[in-house]
Amino acid sequence: MENEIRAIITHMKEWIEVYQDMGFDPPPVRVQRPGSGEEAGANGVRQEKRAGECQTLEELREFIGDCKRCKLHVGRKKLVYGEGNPRARLVFVGEGPGRDEDIAGKPFVGEAGKLLTRIIENGMGIQRGDVYICNVVKCRPPRNRDPERDEVETCLPFLEQQIRIIGPEVICTLGRVAAQTLLDDEFRITRDRGTWRSYNGVPLMPTFHPAYLLRNPAAKRAVWEDVQEIMRRLGMEVKTNA
């Protein structure tokens, strides 16, 4: 019976990937926010308040500690906090660590990360260390599944405070989960990417996740167009032949 269930789950995941590649979006990741009309758990409210008291990225990282606040810590090798310039003008936000990131303890170091680095360095003409890169959740979801609602809600105060501390001029979300987390549940990556949004007054550009580009190289052109928009917003020279 257990083997049959595993086979069904594997089959469903394969079909989800097929539909994603065809441009269809899975159901949205719903995030429960304090004051949004839905009752937030007391623990989530306390956690947001405590995280909001941290004044530096180092202080926030120390506050997070060896986090066991949600079930993602089970099986985790390393917590992936984020890295880059603490005063970056541009912050990239992904959904969560993968296998390589879980091992290294750093965001975007696998194949998708290498592609993101090329976009930053070859495309934008700056160094990866000039920007800040982080994720919605700080621990790897099992089998690289999407983070679940309770996991996102637990980690969200940390991401929000990272953004407050850095004070970027632009945020770029990578993929559906990151965009829905910082924007709203109605966001659809295939429909809405490439359009300027706002997160707490900060201009936000949603685009495809680099992992999606590895499966769908034709989408690289769309991402480059989005990156060009970011560069223009930051007053950077746009390399039209990149």
Image (cartoon, rainbow, N blue to C red):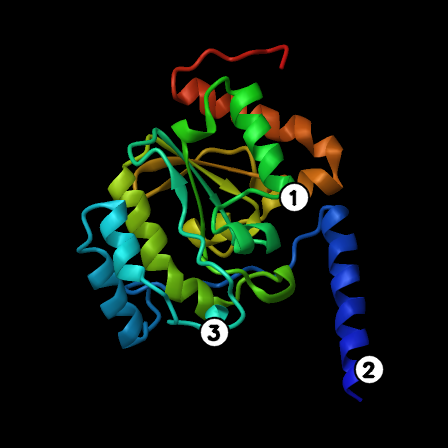
**Amino acid type of the residue that numbered disc 1 sits on in the rendered structure:** Ala
Determine the CA span between mark 1 and mark 2: 29 Å
Q: Earlier in the sequence, mark 1 or mark 2?
A: 2
The local secondary structure at tag 1 comes to helix
Q: Can residue 78 be seen in the rendering of this structure?
A: yes
Q: Residue at x 46, y 20 (%)?
A: 126
Residue 2's x, y, as percent?
A: 76, 86
**Amino acid type of the residue that numbered disc 3 sits on in the rendered structure:** Lys
Q: Nearer the viewer, residue 32 or 71?
A: 71
Residue picked out by circle 3: 71
Q: Residue at x 55, y 31 (%)?
A: 117
Q: Earlier in the sequence, mark 2 or mark 3?
A: 2
Vertical placement of residue 200 versus 6, above or below: above
Q: Nearer the viewer, residue 214 or 67?
A: 67
**Amino acid type of the residue that numbered disc 2 sits on in the rendered structure:** Glu
Which quadrant of the figure contains the C terminus?
A: top right
Residue 137's x, y, as percent?
A: 45, 57
Q: Earlier in the sequence, mark 3 or mark 1?
A: 3
Residue picked out by circle 1: 211
Which quadrant of the figure contains the N terminus?
A: bottom right
Residue picked out by circle 2: 4
Q: Mark 3 Cα within 10 Å, few/some/many (few <14, many 20+)?
A: few
Q: Seen in the image, is 92 located left or right of residue 113?
A: left
Determine the CA span between mark 2 and mark 3: 25 Å
Q: Residue at x 45, y 70 (%)?
A: 150
